[in-house]
Image (cartoon, helix red, strand yellow):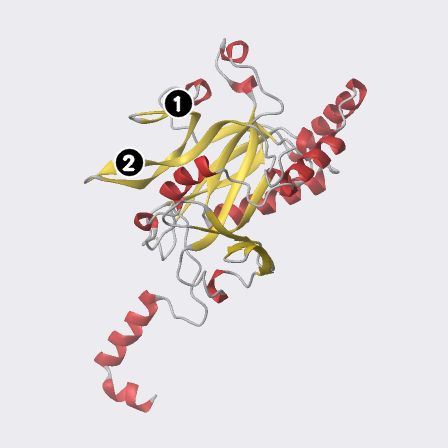
Amino acid sequence: MLKGLALTPPVIGRIAIGKVVERHGKRLPEKDDEFTITSQIQNKDGWIAHPFNDALRKEGQKLRSIPIRLLFDDPDLNFRANYSLFDRQSGRPVCVGDGETCRRVTSAGMQALPCPSPMACSIGAAGNCKPYGRLHVRIRSDNAKDGEKERHPEDELGSFIFRTTGFNSIRTLATRLRYFKAVSGDRLACMDLELRLRGKSTTQSQRTPIYYVDITTKTGSSLEAAVNEARQRREQQTQAGIDQSLLDEAARGGYAMGEFEESEEETVGVMEEFFSDAGQDDLLEDGQEKPPSPGGAAPALAMKLQRKASAHPSAAAAA
């Protein structure tokens, strides 16, 4: 087997809440308020839609929920999240860490080093390093329109990948997966779930909606029913000779074989959509708030205090 090659879940499609568009001669990331399910093939107009993109869409409505199952019982195998720094010229990964340790390409080769998080890191503080999450899911075809299930059956060991650099999405997905693993009795891969787009407004978004991704039980199903179905499905798998624990073990070993999980051909697209200079504004690329800088006041608050001091100089002097 090739050394240094991470064995990641086979990807058969993408799930996105945005796209890259060409504007004024530049390719820029653009946010969206619905999911788009694509194949892995692009043409001159962008990513080609996967048949599920239309099959799961209700007439005249935006696609804001997708029926899914997870591949593994271990949440960390389904959702991979870390701090990532890419080389701006080549698009290759330079440093990947978890807040405690990192793997970094140096002049002396690959090294394992402490990871203090981007704001406290000498090379990450420049703003090029940020959280990066990848969620692998199976899309359940039982909710597809008539005929689509037969034409496009589920690939039970293939995945659709959702990528994000949003704190709200990363935090919510990581939390939900741990909760569902706990309540199902380690039967996470057997639960019928939904990937759901949620919106909220904040001060930093200037009261306009921002969107993040969540995981819930399937529409119309209670938590108790979902857990009971998961238990029955696990019993059926066991009787059929399917060993989920061995599958998790194989996936865990595959991830550990490589230095970085993204291949060079993938990182160019990842850089363009999530790590480009054009995407670094007051909101992250998928519409999520950036965390406040340690020890720094929010710009809006600082401006209010400055205006107040200007209007009342005597009070400012007394303070």
- Earlier along the polypeptide chain: callout 1 or callout 2? 2
Q: Quadrant of the N terminus?
A: top right
The 10 Å Cα crowd at callout 2, few under 14, some 14 to 19, many 20 or more, is: some
Q: Is residue 20 above or below residue 155?
A: below
Q: Residues within 10 Å of mark 1 (few under 14, many from 20)?
A: some
Residue type, label 1: Ala
Residue type at mark 2: give it.
Val
Task: Name the residue: 38% across, 28% down.
Answer: 62
What residue appears at the point 32 percent right and 40 percent down from the top-left corner?
A: 30
Does 201 appear above or below 127?
above
Residue located at (39% from left, 50% from top): 284
Q: Position of residue 261 (x, y in %)?
A: 55, 41
Q: Residue furthest front?
A: 108
Q: Is residue 85 left or right of residue 150?
A: left
Q: Nearer the viewer, residue 285 or 11?
A: 11
Element marked by disc 1: strand
Q: Which residue is mark 1?
A: 49
Q: Residue 51: horizontal and vertical position, in percent?
A: 44, 18
Q: Nearer the viewer, residue 161 or 36?
A: 161
- Locate residue 128 relative to residue 238 in the image: left or right: left
Give yes or no for contact between labels 1 and 2 (Cβ–Cβ under 8 Å): no
Which residue in the protein does label 2 denote? 21
- The reply to whether residue 260 is in sight is yes
Instruction: List x then y, in percent, for residue 174.
Output: 58, 46
Figure quadrant of residue 188: top right
